[in-house]
């Protein structure tokens, strides 16, 4: 959905969802007043200060670890708490049907945010589950090959590795360029890995090691020509970069909402292109399993409904900020961070610079220092949380730059990195 202003958000959302759903979305007065306050805030710095004030991180904590787990803003946390209290006030009513329409509204809001139809979105628990669901579903035969490049997270490889012995399938692990300058370099690595035995390409949208954005659209086009399904691990993408699922053209996409979408913990989104849905089998079967819609993939019986409804508020939070404005802000933070380190021989940034190839995750090596030691120094001396990365010879700190981070925090971070560099 395109948008530039909060008013635009409301108008275009009415178009996508219907007035009733929007009233329900904006039902919380905190949400309406936050949206109104942002709408009247012209100054960019003031706008982001208002957004930052929504987060309840410990005072003094410099949290550069959104790629591990995101904090929920007050709006999302309070809405979820409200749903928990409502559930506890009359458990059987809400768990067994009372929230059916609200669940459908969450599905529609997620679909609108991610460029899909509601009939292609299941509300699951996390990326790991979504990748398992795909690997469990596909009918694979001995000798079949699954392409999963060397930067895949284990949530994207283990579900396939698990079937190597029982089904006799084989993982093919192409090496991706570590710091490419053109997306085509990555597309080429996938192209070279395809053989007549390739049955699926399983790939990240944004890798968790150095934050590289993979060209899912181009690889999907390549695969489609050859009739190969593409399964995407989107754990690090929605909320960090713009995601338009129809435009990407992949078959399946699994994402965790508790990272860059700031949802309550333990909720995720699963997308299956309408035409590819017949390939899928639910991981869990329960009463109602005969349902042929995408809802059959989320049929868990008793489940964490307050968190799922809180996910709806997390979608709203993104819409209130504006997805494009959020993405632009993250790129601005990236520019500021890189600008402070680039050209300094004490540091090596091991993430591609180009905005087509990276956004809010940047991995930096401090030359001559062991990353594990540096990470604990940063935590102990500066209360900086970020993730040390040792794989792929990175020896680097993975810095996540998100909308709750400020320019001042980036200045404090880079000063601490210089101190660590000096030894
Ligand atoms: C690329 C990637 N895939 C999958 C996961 C697993 O996410 P979850 O534990 O939410 O399933 C992560 C978590 O960091 C990740 O970075």
Image (cartoon, rainbow, N blue to C red):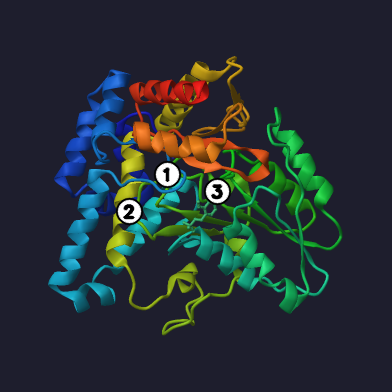
In the image, taking residue 27 as reference, residue 229 lies left or right, namely right
Query: Residue 88, image x and y in percent?
Result: 16, 71
Outermost residue, top side: 343
Q: In this orientation, which residue lies closer to the viewer: 229 or 24?
A: 229
Q: Residue 405 shows which numbered tag? A: none
Q: Which residue is mark 2?
A: 312
Seen at 34% across and 21% down, the residue is 408
Q: CA distance from mark 3 to mark 2?
A: 18 Å
Can you tell which of label 1 and label 2 is closer to the viewer? 1
Query: Residue 328, image x and y in percent?
Result: 45, 27
- Asked which secondary structure carries label 3, the reply is helix
Q: Residue 245 shows which numbered tag? A: 3
Q: Earlier in the sequence, mark 3 or mark 2?
A: 3
- Asked which secondary structure carries label 2, the reply is helix
Q: Earlier in the sequence, mark 1 or mark 3?
A: 3
Q: CA distance from mark 1 to mark 3?
A: 17 Å
Q: CA distance from mark 1 to mark 2?
A: 14 Å
Q: Which residue is mark 1?
A: 260
Res 279 visible: no
Q: In this orientation, which residue lies closer to the viewer: 216 or 395?
A: 395
In the image, taking residue 419 as reference, residue 159 lies left or right, namely right
């Amino acid at each position: 959905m395109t948008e530039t202003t909060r008013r635009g958000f409301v108008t275009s959302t009415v178009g996508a969802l219907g007035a009733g759903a929007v009233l329900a979305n904006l039902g919380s007065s905190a949400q309406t007043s936050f949206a109104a306050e942002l709408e009247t805030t012209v100054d960019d710095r003031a706008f982001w200060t208002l957004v930052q004030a929504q987060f309840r991180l410990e005072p003094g904590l410099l949290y550069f670890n959104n790629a591990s787990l995101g904090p929920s803003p007050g709006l999302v946390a309070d809405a979820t708490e409200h749903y928990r209290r409502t559930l506890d006030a009359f458990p059987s009513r809400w768990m067994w049907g009372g929230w059916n329409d609200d669940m459908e509204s969450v599905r529609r809001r997620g679909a609108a945010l991610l460029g899909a139809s509601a009939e292609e979105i299941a509300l699951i628990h996390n990326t790991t589950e979504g990748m398992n669901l795909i690997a469990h579903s596909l009918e694979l035969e001995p000798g079949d090959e699954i392409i999963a490049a060397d930067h895949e997270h284990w949530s994207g490889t283990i579900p396939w590795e698990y079937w190597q012995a029982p089904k006799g399938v084989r993982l093919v692990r192409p090496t991706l360029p570590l710091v490419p300058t053109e997306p085509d370099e990555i597309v080429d690595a996938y192209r070279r890995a395809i053989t007549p035995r390739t049955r699926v390409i399983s790939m990240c949208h944004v890798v968790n090691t150095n934050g590289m954005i993979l060209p899912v659209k181009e690889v999907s086009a390549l695969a489609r020509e050859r009739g190969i399904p593409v399964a995407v691990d989107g754990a690090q993408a929605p909320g960090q970069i713009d995601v338009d699922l129809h435009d990407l053209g992949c078959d399946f996409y699994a994402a965790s909402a508790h990272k860059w979408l700031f949802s309550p913990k333990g909720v995720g989104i699963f997308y299956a292109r309408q035409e590819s849905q017949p390939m899928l089998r639910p991981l869990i079967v329960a009463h109602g399993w005969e349902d042929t819609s995408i809802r059959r993939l989320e049929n868990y019986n008793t489940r964490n409904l307050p968190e799922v409804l809180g996910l709806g508020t997390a979608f709203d939070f993104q819409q209130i900020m504006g997805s494009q404005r959020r993405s632009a802000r993250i790129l601005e933070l990236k520019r500021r961070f890189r600008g402070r380190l680039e050209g300094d021989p004490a540091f090596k940034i091991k993430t591609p610079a180009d905005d087509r190839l990276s956004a809010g995750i940047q991995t930096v090596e401090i030359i001559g220092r062991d990353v594990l030691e540096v990470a604990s120094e940063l935590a102990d001396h500066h209360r900086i949380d970020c993730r040390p990365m040792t794989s792929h010879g990175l020896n680097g700190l993975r810095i996540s730059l998100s909308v709750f981070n400020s320019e001042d925090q980036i200045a404090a971070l880079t000063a601490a990195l210089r101190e660590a560099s000096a030894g």
